[in-house]
Amino acid sequence: MESAPAVIVAIDGPSGTGKSSTSKAVAAQLGLSYLDTGAQYRAITWWMVTNGIDVDDPSEIAAVAGKPDIVSGTDPAGPTITVDGVDVAGPIRTQEVTAKVSAVSAVPEVRARITELQRSIAAAAEKGIVVEGRDIGTTVLPDADLKIFLTASPEARAARRSGELKNADVHATREALIKRDAADSNRKTSPLAKADDAVEVDTTDLTLPQVIECVVTLVEEKRAAK
Ligand code: DC
């Protein structure tokens, strides 16, 4: 049997829409690689914090943006992330990193560096890849075979994030989410945005298996048409 052609899938949207769970499951089901680009921005933010860089000073961030060596493992069954050889999968999820990641990821030198890394990872994925983030369909991989933009109401997103964070206050989570989305959507360089040719999927009233099935079907249709 001929092997399926490589397929590049871009999945964008704000936090709490089920992007990571969906992207990982779709990649696993279809035998594709998986890249969590938010983890890369979190990793460079972790490095800045750990090295005492003032994250309120874009010029200080820009001057050292090329220093950390960030490596992403793209197996959807066990994605990994290291900085200068250190496993940072846990430390990049702390509240401190979450609170600072929007400021760091708004710096153009950081975006240029991470975007280049993302493109080289996508190009090396022989069977294809699912890449999730905020600007994948618009900026990183504008020629992706399929672009999905996931949305959900702020209430649904806050409830999901609070569930993930175990007993977090839903109201506080909702406020923090809205603040981070506004920062990510309003920055000058490649903001969170839906590409004109992306398929929008509102996940507010869908279960995770329903969202996965919807995206898998869309990928299979694209593959069949290649
Ligand atoms: O998906 P996440 O919540 O782990 O992403 C963390 C932050 O990284 C998010 O607030 C904005 C930034 N980000 C970005 O600017 N561009 C991307 N492609 C992915 C994430």
Image (cartoon, rainbow, N blue to C red):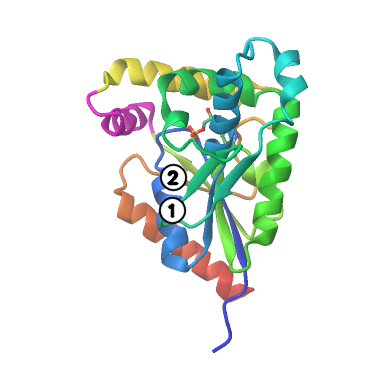
Q: Position of residue 72 (x, y in %)?
A: 57, 47
Q: Is residue 31 above or below residue 120?
A: below
Q: Position of residue 138 (x, y in %)?
A: 68, 42
Indicate the amino acid at tag 2.
Ser
User: Does any atom of ligand 1 lie closer than 8 Å to the CB of label 1?
Assistant: no
Q: Looking at the image, which residue sits at the far front?
A: 85
Neighbour class for label 1 at 10 Å: few (<14), some, many (≥20)? many
Q: Looking at the image, which residue sits at the far left?
A: 167
Mark 1 — residue? Answer: 24
Q: Tell whether 176 sits left or right of 116.
A: left
User: Does any atom of ligand 1 lie closer than 8 Å to the CB of label 2?
Assistant: yes
Image quadrant containing the C terminus: bottom right
Quadrant holding ligand 1?
top right
Q: Position of residue 110 (x, y in %)?
A: 70, 29
Mark 2 and mark 1 in contact (Cβ < 8 Å)? yes
Q: Position of residue 195 (x, y in %)?
A: 64, 43
Mark 2 — residue? Answer: 20
Q: Please name whichever residue, 97 or 9, is drawn nearer the observer in this view of the structure.
A: 97
Residue segment shown in magenta: 153-167
- Magenta segment main secondary structure: helix
Q: Residue at x 57, y 22 (%)?
A: 102
Q: Is residue 195 above or below residue 9?
A: above
